[in-house]
Image (cartoon, coloured by chain):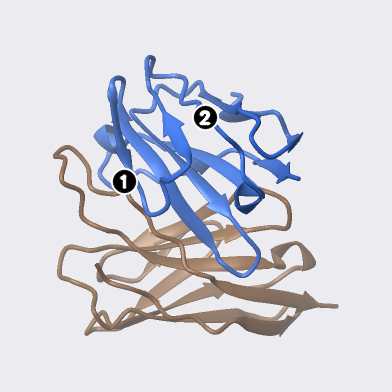
Chain colours: A blue, B brown
Amino acid sequence: NAGVTQTPKFQVLKTGQSMTLQCAQDMNHEYMSWYRQDPGMGLRLIHYSVGAGITDQGEVPNGYNVSRSTTEDFPLRLLSAAPSQTSVYFCASSSPQRGENSPLHFGNGTRLTVT
Amino acid sequence: DAKTTQPPSMDCAEGRAANLPCNHSTISGNEYVYWYRQIHSQGPQYIIHGLKNNETNEMASLIITEDRKSSTLILPHATLRDTAVYYCIVRLPSRYSGGSNYKLTFGKGTLLTVNP
């Protein structure tokens, strides 16, 4: 099983550029989410989705958009990149309907630098 | 939402037990305690979770106090590969039915360094 796959692994953007971070999972999980991780800050929830067509904001949603058109994919869009968005981004999924305590499965991250 | 408090760092000798504490004094009756770890440059990895009883799996043991205000993750025989940041998390309630572990909030965790 591939699990949770994130692409690209590394990305450098200039301020104002846009891009999409891709996240795909092959476990038929209903729930998917995006976190960002900054030095000394732990992981902070950006957006999450409880199923296709449903998304909601997390702790730090500003500057990011998401959509969930399929169960498998949950892309994260930066419309106008800013240096403050330099971070490591993690995508995660789980299947609460298979058990209320179904753990989160994480991808290996996308390391984004905005100059 | 219950919050957790963990020491920022701990050391452990290889082969010895590593005991990682976590305080969650505001935990509510239906909230579970989860532990994840993150090895450098990788995504977080689930370890174990529990409600009120002690739990054990192939990776670790989880001891939860009777009043549920604190817990301890035990790695019985730590190895160098266990060097990682360990996160103690209390599950937040969700406004959707069908599962309530959606919005896991990660703090800063404990950096466990296993020394040879």
Counting from the top left corner in percent of width and height, residue A73 is at 47, 21
Counting from the top left corner in percent of width and height, residue A4 is at 56, 31
- On-image quarter of the C terminus of chain A: top right
Residue placed furthest toward the right: B116
- Contact, CB < 8 Å: mark 1 with mark 2? no
Counting from the top left corner in percent of width and height, residue A93 is at 44, 36
Residue placed furthest toward the front: A16
Q: Is residue B81 above or below residue A25?
A: below
Q: Is residue A77 above or below residue B95?
A: above
Residue A29 seen in the figure: yes
Give the residue type at disc 2.
Arg
Residue A63 vs residue B69: left or right? right
Which of the chains bears the disc numbered 1? B
Q: Pointer 2: what residue?
A: A77
Q: How far, Cα to Cα, is label 1 from label 2? A: 21 Å
Q: Nearer the viewer, mark 1 or mark 2?
A: 2
- Of residue B23 and residue B59, the one placed in the foreground of this image is B23
Q: Residue at x 31, y 20 (%)?
A: A52
Are labels 1 and 2 assigned to the same chain? no
Splitting the image into 4 quarters, where does residue B13 fall?
A: bottom right
Give the residue type at disc 1.
Tyr
Q: Residue at x 40, y 21 (%)?
A: A28
Counting from the top left corner in percent of width and height, residue A43 is at 52, 57
Q: Pointer 1: what residue?
A: B102
Instruction: Mark 1: give few (<14), some (14-19) or many (20+) Cα within 10 Å.
Output: many
Splitting the image into 4 quarters, where does residue A38 fall?
A: bottom right
Residue B14 seen in the figure: no
